[in-house]
């Protein structure tokens, strides 16, 4: 096909195509002209067209399908966390906390109902004071630390990027990546630049390459990385800080989403040289997703940018919700329940990881709500076999920005399975993946 384009640079070609996609002239699934054809039509170098297509792919507007060419993406199909709708299968890919381990907010809510009127402080003073102490660990210039409250971590990330970046600016994301962060970057019109993750978290070479490519923001998970469960070691965090020190005005966002539930120490990537930084801690994992509240600590300039979008009378977070959260996190009994939940998640994931390892599928439990399971065969074939056996699992491919590496992955949420169900799932995964040591189905996994 031929597409009218006037741009001659990579950004100009990308802008022409983006405009046609957004107008609906190019619909989802439309095959774009080959790189060779566009280069010949416009009289430009092929690498210029490759760069343009890469910009569109990183913004989630097109999908490269190898020999199948480059097609306009269906943006409505972006994967999200949570239960799959309308299924009779046992869903073990939700990413949800166990509802039985979420504290009952009834008593705290009853103490949180004082009316708040226009003109009052956006942040509840009690929550702000508590959050300053909770968030300050390893952050630079404690006296300059500012607190902002948003409607969850994704809301915080969206606002942080919007106050610092322009459309088409590049953002470094871990690869594989938390689905919500990937969705936020793509729908915001930014370009996602992948940074590989290994057993110690975000890689130094990957971050250095992203910075050299001109990213203006970096989003890093210091522990309980979703989906892999990796956490930064002290040495890795120090090396990342050294790299970032040469780029003090790049916005560094540290998403410490698992915080109170994590079994790993925090090693921050935000060093004293950083001038633009933010640390986000959501309440959704330990107080429940419906809490919809996150606390952000940041430098003053970043906080001022956030405040512009959180002005009184428009978009502040409910003070009822803020005071309820404060009442819960400062209650000794609730904190003890949160600690018991943390132990439960870690133990159940470790037991299931050992069960898969015993069946010939080596798995590290990592940290977090989920397990990241490497497979010796394509994940799609494992998923289809497990569906026939009554399970709904989540493939790893949607978490990757770049093409998934050789091999394949499942991300499983298994902490709420009883011993019999866990054994059945482990057996079925081993059979579906062709593991050599799959035992006969029916044995229990002691938890």
Image (cartoon, grey):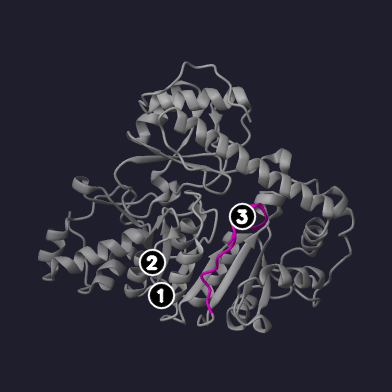
Q: How many numbered marks have been drawn onto this rendered protein structure?
A: 3
Q: Which callout, 2 or 3, points to the residue nearer the camera?
A: 2
Residue 146 quadrant? bottom right
Viewer-closest of 154 and 417: 417
- Residue carrying label 3: 258
Q: What is the x, y in percent for residue 138?
A: 61, 72
Residue picked out by circle 2: 204
Compare residues 364 and 370 and report the one nearer the observer.
364
Q: Earlier in the sequence, mark 1 or mark 2?
A: 2
Image quarter where the C terminus lies is top right
Q: Taken as a whole, is the magenta stretch helix, strand or loop?
A: loop
Q: Position of residue 137 (x, y in %)?
A: 65, 70
Which residue is tagged 1?
Answer: 243
Under tag 2, what secondary structure? helix
Q: Horizontal placement of 82 versus 406: left or right?
A: right
Point out residue 243 in the picture as x, y percentages from the top left corner.
Answer: 41, 75
Q: Disc 1 and disc 2: Cα gap in Å?
A: 8 Å
For the residues labelled 2 and 3, the Cα–Cα distance comes to 23 Å
Front in this rendered view, residue 9 or 278: 278
Crowd class of label 1 (few under 14; some 14 to 19; many from 20; radius 10 Å): some
Disc 2 and disc 3 in contact, CB within 8 angstroms: no
Decide if residue 116 is on the left or right side of residue 235. Answer: right
Q: Disc 1 and disc 3: Cα gap in Å?
A: 25 Å
In percent of the image, x 63 and y 34: which residue is there? 416
Give the magenta-colored segment's residue range. Answer: 256-271
Mark found first going from the N terminus, 2 or 3: 2
Pick the residue in front: 317 or 41: 317
């Amino acid at each position: 096909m031929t597409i009218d384009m006037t741009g001659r640079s990579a950004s100009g070609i990308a802008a022409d195509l983006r405009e046609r996609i957004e107008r609906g002239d190019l619909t989802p699934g439309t095959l774009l002209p080959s790189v060779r054809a566009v280069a010949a039509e416009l009289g430009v170098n092929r690498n210029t067209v490759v760069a343009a297509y890469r910009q569109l792919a990183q913004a989630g507007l097109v999908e490269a399908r190898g020999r199948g060419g480059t097609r306009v993406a269906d943006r409505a199909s972006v994967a999200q966390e949570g239960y799959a709708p309308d299924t009779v299968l046992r869903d073990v890919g939700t990413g949800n906390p166990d509802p039985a381990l979420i504290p009952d907010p009834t008593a705290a809510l009853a103490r949180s109902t004082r009316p708040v009127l226009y003109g009052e402080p956006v942040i509840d003073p009690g929550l702000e004071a508590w959050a300053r102490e909770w968030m300050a660990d390893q952050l630079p210039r404690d006296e300059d630390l500012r607190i902002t409250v948003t409607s969850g971590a994704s809301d915080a990330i969206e606002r942080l990027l919007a106050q610092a970046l322009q459309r088409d600016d590049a953002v470094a994301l871990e690869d594989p990546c938390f689905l919500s962060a990937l969705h936020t970057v793509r729908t915001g019109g930014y370009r996602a630049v992948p940074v590989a993750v290994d057993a110690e978290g975000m890689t130094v070479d990957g971050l250095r390459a992203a910075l050299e490519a001109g990213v203006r923001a970096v989003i890093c998970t210091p522990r309980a990385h979703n989906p892999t469960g990796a956490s930064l070691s002290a040495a890795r965090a120090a090396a990342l800080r050294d790299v970032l020190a040469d780029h003090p005005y790049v916005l560094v966002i540290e998403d410490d989403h698992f915080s109170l539930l994590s079994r790993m120490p925090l090693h921050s990537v935000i060093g004293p040289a950083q001038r633009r930084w933010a640390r986000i801690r959501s309440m959704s994992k330990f107080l429940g997703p419906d809490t919809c509240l996150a606390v952000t600590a940041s430098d003053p300039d970043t906080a001022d940018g956030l405040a512009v979008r959180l002005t009184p009378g428009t978009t502040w977070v409910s003070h009822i919700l803020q005071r309820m959260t404060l009442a819960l996190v400062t209650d000794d009994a609730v904190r003890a329940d949160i600690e018991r939940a943390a132990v439960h998640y870690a133990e159940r994931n470790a037991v299931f990881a050992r069960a898969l390892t015993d069946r010939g599928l080596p798995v590290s439990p990592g940290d977090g709500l989920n397990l990241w399971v490497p497979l010796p065969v394509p994940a799609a074939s494992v998923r289809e076999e497990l569906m026939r056996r009554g399970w709904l699992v989540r493939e790893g491919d949607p978490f990757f920005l770049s093409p998934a590496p050789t091999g394949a992955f499942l991300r499983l949420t298994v902490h709420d399975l009883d011993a019999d169900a866990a054994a059945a799932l482990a057996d079925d995964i081993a059979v579906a993946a062709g593991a050599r040591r799959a035992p006969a189905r029916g044995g229990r996994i002691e938890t």
